[in-house]
Amino acid sequence: MTSLHIIGVGNAFRGDDGVGARVIDRLLERAADAMPHGVRLTKSTGDIAELVQAFGACREAVLIDAVNSSDTLASGAVIRMNLLTQEVPVERLRASSHCLGVAESIALARVLDCLPSKLSLWGIAARNFSLGDRLSPEVATAANTLTDILWRDYLSGHPAETASV
């Protein structure tokens, strides 16, 4: 069982929805050939079965996803949620290109009793989900900031081992 699984959710060819993949790419660049022991970094399209399987195979899952920006959450804002103790923000997660995905995966994993002991979401508020692989400038800046946060909080203190992802 993996200790920590960081999953970038989204579609890299749908504008800001690719922010999860961008953060994973940046973390993989930093880790180079030495991934910290017990850590897995992957990209996901948000497929329900894929996420439920990932939840059941780790102690802690950290999701990175685009969330719907709004009047109270500006594009590029970074939020963090404990998905085991806080209500899953379905209306914020429906904005991305995966119509069914994170919220439904959590609900199904809860019913199947296969949630990890820790499950968090790092969301970046986004508004551009059109075709194309470019992130909006504010989302790209937030992706770099979040990469630094995740590296510091989850990866820099772990001993390294060579691993393939």
Image (cartoon, rainbow, N blue to C red):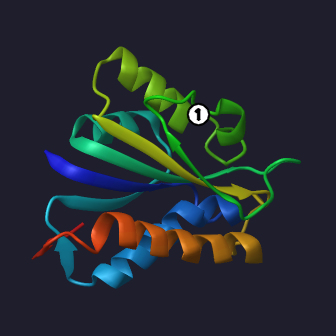
Q: Is residue 87 left or right of residue 92?
A: left
Q: Residue at x 65, y 31 (%)?
A: 90
Q: Residue at x 26, y 53 (%)?
A: 4
| Residue 133 in view in this figure | no
Q: Quadrant of the N terminus?
A: top left
Give the image location of residue 163, x and y in percent: 15, 71
Crowdedness near tag 1: few (<14), some (14–19) or many (≥20) residues, C-alpha within 10 Å: some
Q: Nearer the viewer, residue 121 or 105?
A: 121
Q: Quadrant of the C terminus?
A: bottom left
Q: Is residue 107 above or below residue 56?
A: above
Amino acid at dot 1: Leu
Q: Is residue 58 left or right of residue 133?
A: left
SS type, badge 1 = loop
Count up the numbered dots: 1
The image quarter containing residue 110 is top left
Give the image location of residue 2, x and y in percent: 17, 50
| Residue 1 in view in this figure | yes
Q: Nearer the viewer, residue 151 or 104?
A: 151
Q: Is residue 15 left or right of residue 164?
A: right
Q: Residue at x 46, y 31 (%)?
A: 105
Q: Is residue 76 above or below residue 114?
A: below
Q: Is residue 83 above or below residue 111?
A: below
Q: Nearer the viewer, residue 18 or 90?
A: 90
Give the image location of residue 24, x and y in percent: 43, 68
On the image, numbered disc 1 is attached to which residue?
Answer: 100
Q: Nearer the viewer, residue 52 or 2?
A: 2
